[in-house]
Image (cartoon, rainbow, N blue to C red):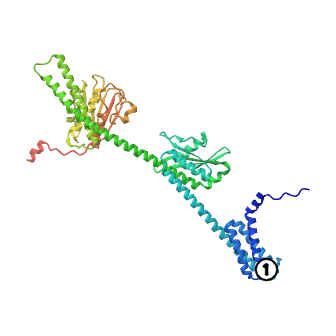
Amino acid sequence: MTAPAAPSISTSLRVLRNPYLLAVATSSLTALIAMPLRDRLDLANTVMLFLLAVVLVAVRLGRGPAILAAFCSVALFDFFFVPPRLSFAVSDVQYLVTFAVMLAVALLISHLTSGLACQARAAKARELQTHTLYELAKALAGALSQTQVHEAGANFLSENLHAETCLLLPDAQDNLHSIVAPAIPLSLAAGHVARQVFDSGKVTENTAGDERHSLLLPLKGSTRMRGVLMVSIKYEDKLLLQRQRSLLMTVASLMAIAIERLHFVEVAQNSQLQVASERLRTSILSALSHDVRTPLTVMYGLADSLALGKPPLSASAQETVITIREQALRLNNMVSNLLDMARMQAGHLRLRKEWQPLEEVIGASINMLGTGLQGHAVKVSLPADLPMIEFDAVLMERVFCNLLENAAKYSPSTADINVRAQVSDAMIEITICNAGAGFPSDRLSRIFDLFERGSVESAVPGFGVGLAICRAIVEAHGGTIRAFNPESGGSCVCFTLPRGTPPQIESENDSGESQ
């Protein structure tokens, strides 16, 4: 027969690591230590040694082994130290009380000590978790892109939970997509669940077959939903996600703050760029307007001198001079528009309002345009009870000139231009319509922007400043302006002016009677 194999070292280590065996060994070791001293120590002191052993077991091994150590300590104390020794028999009933008190005290000590040990371990775990969250927050605070935000969150969850992470963010159309190649295959069902989480803002669990279990957390910003964080773990470890839900929600909140910070930084940078661009453009417009106006005035004056000079020019030369003068005047109007726009954007526009009838400004604008209307008849329809309005006559003439000239340029030859007004309780609405092709429907919202034209490629002269000036002047008066295409065809521009309360004007009869 072969001799039985000796226990392996690994088997011995497993036995030593068993907390209950260690508890029994600790109680036995205490009995061995106290045995040589049993004739010198009082029984009460021996009890203290066993209670100390229970405390050590509770601190190191936990509540269950400490309870076993308490029972073992009572048994060993009875067997080796209470007369008659080496027997569980009790010679005096009072020792039963000693056993009961010793067991109760041991159990109470094991309970309190193990509870304190658990609290200490929990506090240490919380401290470690707080430290790791601090490191995550520091990494997210220094993130310069959404990819770095994803990497910081993914590394944290991988190290602490051994989980895989997918960060889903919305695009311009609010469609969710992963910013990097996702470690988690995003199926159609998972994409649908992510959409629901993004819309509802509620944490949702999702199981992909029997292999992985996912928790989808919304990334809530201060102003809107910023995305969805998808955390995936092995299916058999799904309880870990449930126990660590508060930690995952904290991570999602930190990532949402980081993503929102990047968004606001981008918005601020774009705003600064736009402000700098507008300032540069205004400076260029102002400089060009001043520098171009002087030679234009000279050209217009020379053309006028040639047209009125003696002896008169031939018919063809006279026609050429008139054309030069008209084109110089048109270019001068364009430069004036640019200069006015630069002045308005710089905040130097001052209104000189006076109460005056609207029909006078409309008539003055038509006369000022003259040949600029290109033969189009302007039909004006004003209500009989149209009150006087408080406005800046010079600026309002510019509005009518720009709108009438624009209507003439985009109308068929000899087509009428209609101007009408309506009175409401608080506003007076003026509409100017032509019979042209109408505004492009996709540009109606931008037609009043600076340098915006109805058609990008157009044979009609102009560079998109007139309507922008009209909007600036109308809004400075407290009104609104819009463009639309009526169902009957053509195009219309409608603007409003505050009606206000006109001053009372005394008639001549009333004035005479008062004298």
Left or right side of 72 for 428: left
Residue at image coords 55%, 41%: 180
User: Mark 1, residues whose alpha carbon is within 10 Å: few (<14), some, or many (≥20)?
Assistant: some
> Three-letter amino acid code at disc 1?
Val
User: Seen from this angle, which residue lies furthest right?
Assistant: 1
Residue at image coords 14%, 23%: 306
The quadrant in which residue 244 appears is bottom right
- Asked whether residue 245 appears in the rendered view, the answer is yes
Please determine whether, in this image, residue 374 is positioned above or below residue 421: above
Q: Residue 280's x, y, as percent?
A: 31, 40
Q: Element type at marker 1?
A: loop
Q: Relative to the observer, which residue lies in front, 269 or 453?
A: 269
- Asked whether residue 385 appears in the rendered view, the answer is no
Residue at image coords 19%, 27%: 299
Q: Residue 396's x, y, as percent?
A: 24, 37
Please determine whether, in this image, residue 38 is positioned above or below residue 60: below
User: Seen from this angle, which residue lies furthest left?
Assistant: 515
Q: To which residue does mark 1 refer?
A: 82
Q: Residue 76's x, y, as percent?
A: 78, 74
Q: Relative to the observer, which residue lies in front, 7 or 301?
A: 7
Quadrant placement of the N terminus: bottom right
Q: Relative to the observer, which residue lies in front, 279 or 220?
A: 279
